[in-house]
Amino acid sequence: MALKNSAILIRNAIVPILLVVQAVMMPTQARANDYLQCVPFARELSGIQIYGDAHSWWDQAAGKYQRGAMPVEGAVLSLPSHGAMQLGHVAVVRDIVDDRNILISHANWSPINGKRGQIERRVAAQDVSARNDWSLIRIWYAPIENLGTTAFPVNGFIYPARQTAPDGRQWASAKPARQSRMPNRSLFDRRLTADLEQSAAEERPTDAEPRDLIGELLDRVGS
């Protein structure tokens, strides 16, 4: 009887561990139908080690990472909860086009081929704030093949630890924004078209993308 009770206790202790291992090590094909959230993608691309819902990143970054109002390459764009976007959003700045336009890479923004959770690389984001302070932006929306019609409020930009906070408008190592406040639309449109073609030719959002499985589990249960 004692032996049977011991076996039951051992089984009850092991089963939860096995369930966790199974969830982490599930076959690739089983995960292929899942979609990628913006948080693990931004964390992998930027190297900024923050976990939890996107809307919590700005506050979590305080005291850990430099924060600021101006975009620089490699920084994480942080959006608070807004309307139906209750969990906020994070994206990584990939290029400075001019002082009103940047290119970002992010996940789970536009539905592509009817599927959410897709990765978009080097797509447009535009500052539409009255003071050109990046407090309000519009972001490329794939279904309409243009900037979306909604203007989203911005918390700011979180800078990777390997860099220092920008002195004024930008890091010394970052590409300077063009001085004109009126974007060169012809140049911007050509660069955007080229970037979209390059993005389409690159790998699609599949399980070949880097995955931080432990991080994803933490993201799903919050910080």
Image (cartoon, rainbow, N blue to C red):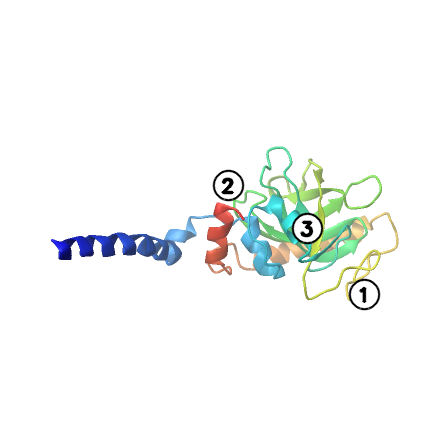
Q: Nearer the viewer, mark 1 or mark 2?
A: 1
The image quarter in which residue 44 lies: bottom right
Cα separation between marks 1 and 2: 41 Å
Q: Position of residue 4 (x, y in %)?
A: 14, 54
Q: Position of residue 64 (x, y in %)?
A: 66, 58
In the image, what residue type sits under mark 1? Ala
Q: Nearer the viewer, residue 69 or 112?
A: 69
Q: Which mark is residue 172?
A: 1
In the image, what residue type sits under mark 3? Leu
Q: Position of residue 9 (x, y in %)?
A: 23, 53
Seen from this angle, which residue lies furthest right?
180
- Res. 81 visible in picture: yes
Using residue 16 as the reference point, say whether residue 151 is left or right of it.
right
Badge 2: residue crowd in 10 Å (few <14, some 14–19, many ≥20): few
Badge 3: residue crowd in 10 Å (few <14, some 14–19, many ≥20): many
Instruction: Name the element at disc 2.
Output: loop
- What residue does disc 2 label? 114
> Sequence order check: which comes first, mark 1 or mark 2?
2
In the image, what residue type sits under mark 2? Gly
Q: Nearer the viewer, residue 167 or 140?
A: 167
Instruction: Name the element at disc 1.
Output: loop
Using residue 192 as the reference point, say whether residue 45 is left or right of it.
left
Q: Residue at x 35, y 57 (%)?
A: 21
